[in-house]
Every structure is written in structure tokens, then in C-alpha cells.
Image (tube, rainbow, N blue to C red):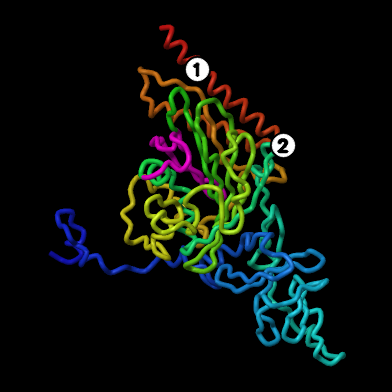
Amino acid sequence: MAVQEQSRSGDNAYVGDYRRNVPGEDAELTHVGPNTPCGEFMRRYWHPVALSSDVSDLPLAVRILGEDLVVFRDKANRVGVLHRHCSHRGTSLEYGIPSDQGIRCCYHGWLFDVDGRILETPGEPPDSRLKDSFVHGAYPAEERHGLIFAYMGPPDEIPEFPVFDTYLTPANNRLIPYSLWQPCNWLQIRENGMDPIHAVFLHSRLTEVHFTEPWASMPVYEFFETGDGMHYLTTRRVGEFLWIRSAQFTLSNIGQTGGLWEEATESKYFGRVSLTRWVVPVDDTNSWIFGLRHFNDVVDPEHQGREEECGHDSVDFVGQDGNRPYAERQRNPGDWDAQVSQRPIAVHDLEHRGSTDVGVAMLRRIVRETIRGEKTPVIPTGMAAGNEVMYTYSHDTVLRVPARDDLDDEEVQREVGRRVMEAIKSGDAVSDAEAREAQIVECLKEIEAGASRRSEIKSEA
């Protein structure tokens, strides 16, 4: 038997000798440095590069998309993102001195503005035109919600800065920034968000229950493309209720997910998100998750979240960082352990994907087609309706829909889930965000009332 045939045969055991060679990674999707296909694709988007709290009176050295940068705040409280090494002799600007305007290199005092213009070269003769002859590498920066963002692509193609509807709802929503270090490739982290079935096992059935008991139920699930990414739809039976949930992936590297501690014991209509996360490549084998934790009475009515635990390399739910003792992580692994242990770059050619991996395959295809120019991302919601915010679909909805003996409950879950998503997407054409939410909630209540009436008719019969 040929080695390849023997290594694939299900009748043979102890075939490690035939499977010891590890093929290369999918470079098109995983390599992110300058002039790589994925790297150039990602540079067309805004990315968080630091927590605001990490950039005070001292500069911060960072590495993003394979480039060495410095993030700083000058004395006018402007943030700058510059190439790290001084254009004069290469000294790192992480040792620079923030000035009233820009940052000054410690070696010879050259002064750089946040846009890269060279304001002073104090060691040069007064009539020197050296400072006007070139510009230091710099990237546009924005500071929002406790995060510092940079745009690292062509300066004449800067996109609008995305503002998601989830930032603004409910009215008392509080956004708390955090970061998580991940020593692995960006893609295997990001695609975890489009794998809802891992929550059944990793977070529920196999070790400790990380969130709530309903997560352990196997959901009915589907995946859908949007103009700028995709989302999943899961529906679970929890007693007399159906828990319908969507999480969304938005190009290039953004994910939004609903509540963490959903019990699904009472009706909820279009509850929004607990997490907005960017997976930002440091280089091919390291990443930062920069995120915003959402705290409000809708997404966390029992106040189980802990704002004080959210910050640098820390968030308030288990398994998201590598800071726990190794033995503890072995006994109770979380997302960090499952993602990082796939190798520094996961090798797709060694995978044996199944039916639960449809979302992962879809995400990879969307990214690949966008990299190749075969797909042009469009924003189908919010801004297209003339609003200033981008409409999104991530949510938790809980409807009272009792099971019926005369109906296949899996089909009921699938039908109700689809109707919920249709109701949410019906709000896309509404230009006012508040009016959109009111319309969606009214539609969801009608779905619930209709299901309840059908159950009552059956019960009377």
C-alpha cells in the first residue's frame, strides 16, 4: 500500500510514522507583512493598535502587521503612530520625548509631528533644508472609547471610521476597553467566532461550565453572508423558550457577540452585544485582541460581569488569556488554549473538517475572495440607509415558543430562527437607529404572539 493510501486508511492504527510531515500554512490567508496579499488587504481598514491607558507620558513600542511602530501622546494630547526608528540614524522613538507638538528623538533632538513632518533638526545649520526634504513614516490615528486606532493603507484610500449601532444601545451602555495577547496567527483566533459549536463542548460539556447551562444544548445553526462579512444564527430549546442568537464577523477582523450569561428563562427582544473585538496581527505568529466589553442591564441583568477585570491583557471571563497556571489551563481550557495550541499558524491541509465547520470555511472563503479582488465589500446596513452608524445583526432574542407534539421541534427552531433574522434585517432600510430598533422589537413580539396562539389552539384541541 502506498504511504499516502495507508495514511488515509481507517483500518490501520498507529500511523504516526506516515503523518509526521507537516505541510506549509495557507500563506495567502495568514501572512500579514508588507506586500503580502493578506497584509495589503488588512491595511485598508482601521485597526486598534493600543489601549489609551497604555499611552500616557511615555511612548509605546508596538508591532502591527509586521511593522515596528511607536504610539505616543504629545503634550497637546494628540496621538501619533509613527515608524519606530528615527529617520536620522535609526534610534528607536520609544525613547523619544513627547513635546508640545510631536515627539523628539533622544539622540539628536529631531522633532517629528504626528503626521510625520519633520519640524526641527536642531543640530543642523539654521539655513538647512534637510527637514523639508522628506517626511518620516506616519499613519493616521484616531482615539475612540479608550482605544487608539491606526490606518496603515494608502493615504488616499482612508475609509470612514466605523461606528457600530451596538455602541449606542441600550441607552446606559458602558464600553470598557481591554486587550489580550495571543501567540498565534490572527485567522485561527478570528474564525473561532464563527464556530458556535465549540461553545457546546469547550465552554460547557467537557470541563467547567464557563457561562450558563443553556450553552450546553446543541443548537440548530445556519450561516449567512452579508455585504461586509457574515453571521451565524443559532437556536436552542430551553424549556418553553427558544433562545435565538447571532454573532457577526465584519471585514477585515471584527467580531461582535451577544450576551455571555444568558439563562433564557424569560422573553428578550433584540438584546445586543457584550463584546466587540478586533483581532489585530502583530506578525504572522502573534496577535492582539483589542476589544470593548459592553456593560448594561440588558446584556447582563444579573451583573455577573466585572468591569475592574478588563484592561491590559485581561478580561472578565475565563480562558481568554495565557496568564493562568499551565495545569489549571489543562484541566479547564478556554479559547486561548484551544486557539494558541493549533500551532503558531494552523495548518489547514491537516484538518478533517466536518458539518460544524461550515462557518469557518465560509469565513476563509470570504477573506480569500476579498484578498483576490473577487469580492468587493459593501456596507449593506446603516450607513447605506443614510445613518451615521453601521447597523449590525449580533443579538440575543428569547421567545416563549412551547414545544408541540405534532411538530418536529428542530424544524420549529429553524423556522423561528429564520423569522427572527428576517425581522432584524427588515430594519435595514430604516434610517433612524431608534426607529429601526423599535420596528424590530415589534416584529419579534408578533412572532412570539403568533407562536403562542398556535400552541394555545393546539392545547384546546
- 256 on left or right of 16: right
Can you say whether 319 is above or below 267 in the image? Answer: below
- 34 on left or right of 330: right
Give the residue number, with chain letter if any, for mark 2.
432
Can you say whether 201 is above or below 150 in the image? Answer: above
- The amino acid at mark 2 is Asp
* The quadrant where residue 280 appears: bottom right
Q: Where residue 258 sits: x, y (%)?
A: 55, 40
The residue nearer to you, when weighing 165 against 69, is 69
Q: Residues within 10 Å of mark 2 (few under 14, many from 20)?
A: some
- The amino acid at mark 1 is Ser
Q: Where, quadrant-wise, is the C terminus in this rendering?
A: top left
Q: CA distance from mark 1 to mark 2?
A: 30 Å
The image's mark for residue 452 is 1
Looking at the rendering, the stretch of residues picked out in magenta corresponds to 207-235
Residue reaching furthest to the left: 1
Instruction: Say if the magenta span includes residue 210.
Output: yes
Q: Where residue 339 sits: x, y (%)?
A: 43, 57
**Residue pictured at 65% horizontal, 68% vertical:** 154
Q: Where residue 67 sits: x, y (%)?
A: 58, 73
Instruction: Say if the magenta span includes residue 273.
Output: no
Q: Secondary structure at mark 1?
A: helix
Q: Residues within 10 Å of mark 1 (few under 14, many from 20)?
A: some
Q: Secondary structure at mark 2?
A: loop
Q: Where, quadrant-wise, is the N terminus in this rendering?
A: bottom left
Any part of residue 267 in sight? yes
The image's mark for residue 410 is none
The residue nearer to you, when weighing 308 against 52, is 308
Q: Where residue 175 sits: x, y (%)?
A: 66, 47
- 451 on left or right of 164: left
Q: Which mark is nearer the camera, 1 or 2?
A: 1
**Residue pictured at 46% horizontal, 43% vertical:** 210
